[in-house]
Amino acid sequence: MIYMLLVISVLIGMLMPIQASINAELTRILQNPFLGAFISFFMGSLALFIVCLIQGNFLIDLKRLTLASPYQFIGGLFGALFVGSSIILIPKLGATTLMAAFVTGQLLMSLAIDHYGWFGITTQPISLQRLFGVILLFTGLLLIVKKAA
């Protein structure tokens, strides 16, 4: 079961550089990175709204928003930062460098989140094995960025 979830996760991860590239293309046409990011979020919001409609009872679920802490509403801001920055950075860095840098940052923060159990995540202490994996990824990022001789 875990291997199937890993394959699904990798396949979804493969969509990220495609998304960033398509958004950058749209931005070239629109000549406005914020409008390109807005269109991307609008289309994503529309898709999620349709899914919520299909599921039904989402209005009842919305009432639970009063139970959320204020910080739990900033996830969308981080998503906007991710999409907006990827639109600006992918033409300058290329897809491989950008995604390697994003993944490196994601893993560094993930280590801290797992170790301290932030945001209700089950605690998983930093181990040498996990740390070594992140160091290898960071090394990979440096190799990707290094200019060929």
Image (tube, rainbow, N blue to C red):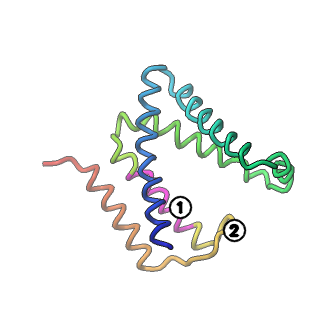
Would residue 3 be found to the left or right of residue 94 on screen? right
Identify the residue at horizontal 67%, vertical 45% (top origin).
51
Across and down, in percent, residue 26 comes to: 46, 26
Give the secondary structure at mark 1: helix
For residue 112, above or below residue 59: below
Seen at 62% across and 39% down, the residue is 47
In the rendered image, residue 65 lying in the magenta stretch gets the answer: no
What amino acid is labelled 1 in the image? Answer: Met
Tell me if 105 is positioned left or right of 47 in this view.
left
Dominant secondary structure (helix, strand or loop) of the stretch shown in magenta: helix
Q: Residue 145's x, y, as percent?
A: 28, 49
Q: Amino acid at mark 2?
A: Gly
- Which mark identifies residue 109? 1
**For this view, does 84 lie left or right of residue 96?**
right
The quadrant holding residue 133 is: bottom left
Magenta-highlighted residues = 100-112
The residue to which callout 2 is attached is: 120
In this rendered view, identify the residue nearer to me: 17 or 139: 17
Sequence-wise, the earlier of marks 2 and 1 is 1
Residue 146, horizontal then vertical, whole percent: 24, 50
Cα gap from disc 2 to disc 1, whole angstroms:
15 Å
